[in-house]
DNA sequence: GGACACATGTAACAAGTTACATGATTGG
DNA sequence: CCAATCATGTAACTTGTTACATGTGTCC
């Protein structure tokens, strides 16, 4: 039921389904994501429960928009969820699962390249998070001076950044370790012990 | 389709559905999880595709077991998946979403407690990962001496550990920052500016 | 006129969870 | 005999993805 409550939280400021997806693609990207085709029916259902109201309004550019806003009972439901305590789901990180089975590929060089690709993607994500952080820091200075809501949002961003940095460090460490293995087996090959292509 | 391939990977050593779930609860816990009720039908489907074979055998303790093993074509499919390059899904971290909206609760003290609960859970997970790491390090010494397969599995474990440590550091940092806010508002209340219970 | 961003939706499917049903064996 | 662990499975449901359908307004 998390998506329900996340939409409730986002709709403290009125927004359309389309707006919400943009939020998932930018400021909420490091903790949640939903497709438009999931967002639209959920909004309808939440309106049915009385947690949202909607109105249509003309778009500045494009067809009519349906703009949703949270009701009092919707806000109460959001608070109830927040008071439940932290929700933990299961982690599902497919590329880590892939690494776990990588010895099927035989060649440490390919594993090194694989981790290199992971690094590229993580570095890109880190860059987008840092691009969100910079203007916030410029506007307010030290986080201790932030208003509460901005501090909480800033803190979730910080976690995203710190975890991404940890991942990058891990990639570098792992690549170095794999590179040593590649060099070592090349050395053995040169010494005539093993032919590199025949293995 | 990740679960299909993860089961294929795990079944390089023959195992039952029940065994596989135990693996998800222990050594695979930091990158994937699946319920028994999901595992059983998937195994059946993979057998139908010719990627697994099964036989029944008596259990040492309990009813008959159905033991699966990967076939040549199953192994080829696993390799194909590994060669596709790293798979990235969307992160969904409900407790971070909760923090993002925490200003609805009004009180920084409650947010601090919330992050404290997060810390407790993450610390427990970190402890279980470190408990897996210790005997591996004891057995092999330096990771550079590990055989390839063990190095890859060890590396996934290291990522889990390093990310968990980064999360713990973030919790401590965040709690400190929130604590300062709690103390600050208590100070204001003492100075007669705001009555703490009337807000 | 065509590409692109804006905008809303449905349908079919895949993945994952929760609840239920059944039964063997072991240890207290 | 009761609880716990071992063991396999189905059914109903929820959640999330991919593909499709439709149409507006802007810029080149």
Image (cartoon, coloured by chain):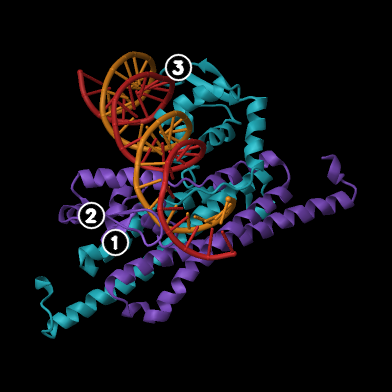
Chain colours: A cyan, B purple, C red, D orange
Mark 3: secondary structure = loop
Q: Is residue B86 visible?
A: no
The residue under the point 66% across, 37% down is A79
In this rendering, position of residue A62 left or right of residue B77 = right
* Distance in Å between CA atoms under marks 1 and 2: 9 Å
Extreme residue toward the bottom, this view: A191
Residue, disc 1: A101
* Residue B38 coordinates in the image, percent (x, y): 38, 44
Crowding around mark 1 (Cα neighbors within 10 Å: few <14, some 14 to 19, many 20+) is: many
Residue, disc 3: A64
The residue under the point 12% across, 72% down is A199
Q: Is residue B66 visible?
A: yes
Asked whether the beta carbons under mark 1 and mark 2 sit within 8 Å of each other, the answer is yes
Output the chain of dot 2.
Answer: B
* Residue A134 coordinates in the image, percent (x, y): 52, 51
Output the chain of dot 1.
Answer: A
Mark 1: secondary structure = loop
């Amino acid at each position: 039921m998390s998506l329900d409550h996340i939409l409730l939280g986002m709709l403290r400021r009125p927004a359309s389904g389309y707006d919400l997806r943009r939020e998932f693609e930018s400021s909420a990207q490091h903790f949640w994501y939903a497709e438009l085709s999931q967002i639209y029916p959920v909004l309808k259902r939440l309106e049915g429960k009385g947690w949202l109201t909607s109105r249509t309004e003309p778009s500045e550019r494009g067809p009519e928009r349906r703009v949703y806003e949270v009701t009092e009972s919707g806000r109460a439901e959001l608070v109830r969820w927040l008071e439940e305590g932290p929700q933990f789901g299961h982690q599902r990180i497919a590329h880590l699962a892939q690494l776990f089975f990588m010895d099927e590929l035989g060649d440490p060089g390919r594993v090194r390249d694989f981790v290199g690709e992971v690094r590229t993607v993580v570095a890109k994500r880190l860059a987008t998070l840092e691009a969100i952080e910079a203007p916030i820091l410029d506007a307010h200075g030290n986080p201790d001076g932030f208003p509460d809501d901005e501090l909480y949002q800033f803190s979730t961003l910080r976690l995203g950044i710190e975890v991404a940095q940890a991942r990058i460090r891990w990639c570098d460490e792992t690549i170095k370790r794999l590179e040593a293995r590649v060099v070592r087996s090349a050395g053995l090959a040169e010494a005539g012990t093993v032919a590199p292509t025949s293995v």
